[in-house]
Amino acid sequence: MSVGTILLIVVALMLIGAIPGWPHSRTWGYGPSGGIGLILIILLVLLLTGRL
């Protein structure tokens, strides 16, 4: 497995973990998952263009 694939898997798991599921985190909105989603999209584009 290449480093890019491992990074993509780790960020995807972080995105799933950022979904607000606890009562104290329901008011956070889209902040945590939106930021991690943006990182996931950037890594995906870099992986597809061959720069990672």
Image (cartoon, helix red, strand yellow):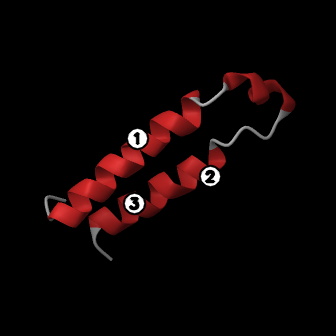
Asked which secondary structure carries label 2, the reply is helix
Q: Residue at x 66, y 27 (%)?
A: 29
Tell me residue 12's x, y (percent): 50, 56
Tell me residue 48's x, y (percent): 23, 65
Examine the rendered structure and indicate whether residue 34 appears above or below residue 49. Answer: above
Q: Circle 3 sits on which residue?
A: 8
Examine the rendered structure and indicate whether residue 17 appears above or below residue 6. Answer: above
Q: CA distance from mark 3 to mark 1?
A: 12 Å
Q: Circle 2 sits on which residue?
A: 16
Q: Nearer the viewer, residue 42 or 13?
A: 42
Q: Is residue 20 left or right of residue 41?
A: right
Q: Circle 1 sits on which residue?
A: 38
Tell me the kind of residue under disc 1.
Leu
Q: Residue at x 86, y 30 (%)?
A: 23
Q: Is residue 11 left or right of residue 29?
A: left
Q: Are marks 2 and 1 in contact (CB under 8 Å)?
A: no
Around disc 1, counting alpha carbons within 10 Å, would you say few (fewer than 14), some (14 to 19), or many (20 or more)?
few
Q: CA distance from mark 3 to mark 2?
A: 13 Å
Lower position in the chain sequence, tag 3 or tag 1: 3
Which quadrant does the C terminus fall into?
bottom left
Around disc 3, counting alpha carbons within 10 Å, would you say few (fewer than 14), some (14 to 19), or many (20 or more)?
some
Lower position in the chain sequence, tag 2 or tag 1: 2
Q: Are marks 3 and 1 in contact (CB under 8 Å)?
A: no
Q: CA distance from mark 2 to mark 1?
A: 13 Å
Tell me the kind of residue under disc 3.
Leu
Tell me residue 42's x, y (percent): 30, 47
Q: Residue at x 47, y 41 (%)?
A: 36
Q: Is residue 3 left or right of residue 19?
A: left
